[in-house]
Image (cartoon, coloured by chain):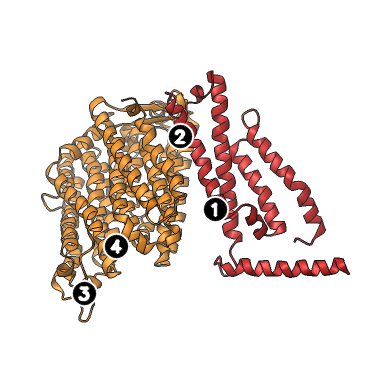
Amino acid sequence: MTLAIHYPALQVVLPLLAAPLCSLMRGRDFAWAFATLVSWLAFGIAVALLFAVRADGAISYHLGGWEPPWGIEYRVDALGSYLLAIVTLISAVSLSFARLSVAREVRQDQHALFYTMWLLCLAGMLGIAITGDAFNIFVFLEVSSLSTYALVAMGGGGDRRALTAAYQYLVLGTIGATFILIGIGLIYMMTGTLNILDMSERLPAVADTRTIRVAAGFLTIGIALKLALFPLHVWLPNAYTYAPNAVSAFIAGTSTKVSLYLLLRFSLTVFGPTFSFGKLPLNEILAVLAVAAFLIFSALAILQENVKRLLAYSSIAQVGYMVLGISFASVTGLTAGIVHLFNHALIKTGLFLCVACVAYRIGSVRITAMAGLGRQMPFTMFAFVLGGFGLIGVPLTAGFVTKWYLIMAALEAGTSLGLVAAGLVLVSSLLAVIYVWKVVESAYFRPAPAGSPPVREAPLALLVPTWALILASIYFGIDTRISVGVARDAAVALLGGIS
Amino acid sequence: MRYDGVPRIVSKLLIPLILLFGLYVQFHGDYGPGGGFQAGVIFAAGFILYALIFGLRRCREVLSDGFVRIMLAAGLLLYIGTGLASLWLGANFLDYDVLGHDPVSGQHHGILLVELGVGITVAGAMLAIFFSFAGRDETGFSGADDAEAEAEAEAEAEERERAETGA
């Protein structure tokens, strides 16, 4: 089929084309139906690309027919195609969920713009994953970030704190993006190229200059800000808490994942493992921050009264697991980090969708307000329990797969620091038991407050997408052939230099 | 400012020139300095100047909010449409070579269309930003009373003007 060779371009162009059309739509649900359809189509393209890359290796697409390194190249490799599949899947499922939830939380006259922003955000994130051009990455990063700020701010219809959350995110996100741009600019200054592959070939010759070391610093800090890596996480809890529920689910499963992709792309593909982990102590710095992130934020999550905020704190901790995996600088460690991109996206989006179901019925996401819901909304709360198992890392859930590989990597490394990190992963998992239990206890073991109106189970339109993700997170905890297989391919390709 | 002679007359002289210069920058962008982004900003500046001198309401009579929103979408659609056209004609996305009878004229058509798309969207974005800020009153809410109050004040002023010229 001739169209198939254009899939890399269509992957980004389809949502980008749909966004302006969506902004012109009138009527209640047209914009939603259109955006959802486009998002599922994008998922179809991503799956086709994933299998094409697995079968025949990386795909290169020359935009405008200009040869790289002069023109802009779209390059789909194992890691990129994995991320494309994750982002499109999460977007498609949360959009399928969004109609009822958004109708209640976002002002009616903003609906068309809401879905426009969503599609732009999707296009931006897909662009980051697919492009092989460093400046292009920055452009797509801005497209996705600016639309995310707007999406978060649209929670302001119900709760005006969303506006300050969005503003805080805007300020910190812009600083992050600026740092990334400065980093790219400095590399461009030394290598004279913006194509990522070309950069990685030319970089070793100039690697011993201060300019390149400064570039690495700017890029790492900028990306860490976008990634919400402790201690640069300040924007995340408010943004996740006050955004419309469907948006929380969408960005929890995608935006930090895309940033982690950038960290991998720049530290391993562009700078290369020998520079990042040999000449610079990036792995040691990341390991310390990662361990601090999951210990501190698993503990802080226990103290939260708002379930969305609890999940946001848990997200910061989970970012810690991913970064810890990378910091081992081994194939197993990277596999753990990359497979957790996928597993955490499924689990956390599933959990946010459960919370959105609760919010749809009782209008509150506080733990105390969820008392007695275990009997009144059995399907929703049981989905939450299964998702919670995933966060803890109970065997037969996707979360277990990640922790298995993390601990394997730690034991493989054999250093005392690695062993300590493995022990701390277990401690953090126990903390996760406590914060998940707090919600479970309230829902199952406390009676509903006397005199509260009866609550019905969430409508099927909300339950189906929620359960789809939760069941997927169980499925990929048992059958890891695809999720771990692709992650391992990506890890091997990224570490090509040393192993 | 509508009743100050100097700004009114100067802007009336300048606005057509600004719009013309915007079009020049737009369509001369492939030979000389310029292009869609700059042209869009200049073109929008003409309308913004008009709104500053003659009032936001009159400017919005010509360019309604709905029209500005269509401009925003149309430019992007033109850009992507050009890319899809080259895809349709069998080349890669945004490969202009196939858009003309030979690659040189194809490149020519392609860049002209794409830059026109950029120009339309940028002009739309500038106007949308200006309208949304200028359309707010001091409390920070864009109220409907605002437009009504302005219309009333204007009707009053026109009456006074008529009375003065009559006298």
* Neighbour tally class for label 4: few under 14, some 14-19, many 20 plus, Cα within 10 Å: many
Residue pictured at 35% horizontal, 38% vertical: A129
A65 or A180: nearer the viewer:
A65
Are discs 2 and 4 less than 8 Å apart at CB? no
Instruction: Quote the CA–CA distance across marks 2 and 4.
Output: 39 Å
User: Relative to residue A64, is residue A245 drawn left or right?
Assistant: left
Return the x and y of residue A433 as percentages of the image width and height.
Answer: 16, 61
Mark 1 or 3, closer to the camera: 1
Q: Which chain is orange?
A: A
Return the x and y of residue A359 as percentages of the image width and height.
Answer: 28, 65
Picture quarter containing residue A101?
Answer: bottom left
Tell me the tag on residue A187: 2
- Mark found first going from the N terminus, 2 or 4: 2
**Looking at the picture, do discs 1 and 4 lie on one chain?**
no
Looking at the rendered structure, the kind of residue marked 1 is: Gly
Looking at the rendered structure, the kind of residue marked 2 is: Ile
Are discs 1 and 3 less than 8 Å apart at CB? no
Residue denoted by label 4: A308
**Looking at the picture, do discs 3 and 2 lie on one chain?**
yes
Residue denoted by label 1: B66
Q: Is residue A42 visible?
A: yes
Specify the farthest residue to the top: B102
- Secondary structure category for the residue under label 4: helix
Specify the farthest residue to the bottom: A451
Q: Which chain is red?
A: B
Instruction: Quote the CA–CA distance across marks 3 and 4.
Output: 23 Å
Mark 3 or 2, closer to the camera: 3
Residue denoted by label 3: A454
User: In the picture, which quadrant includes the N terminus of chain A?
Assistant: top left
Residue pictured at 41% horizontal, 52% vertical: A148
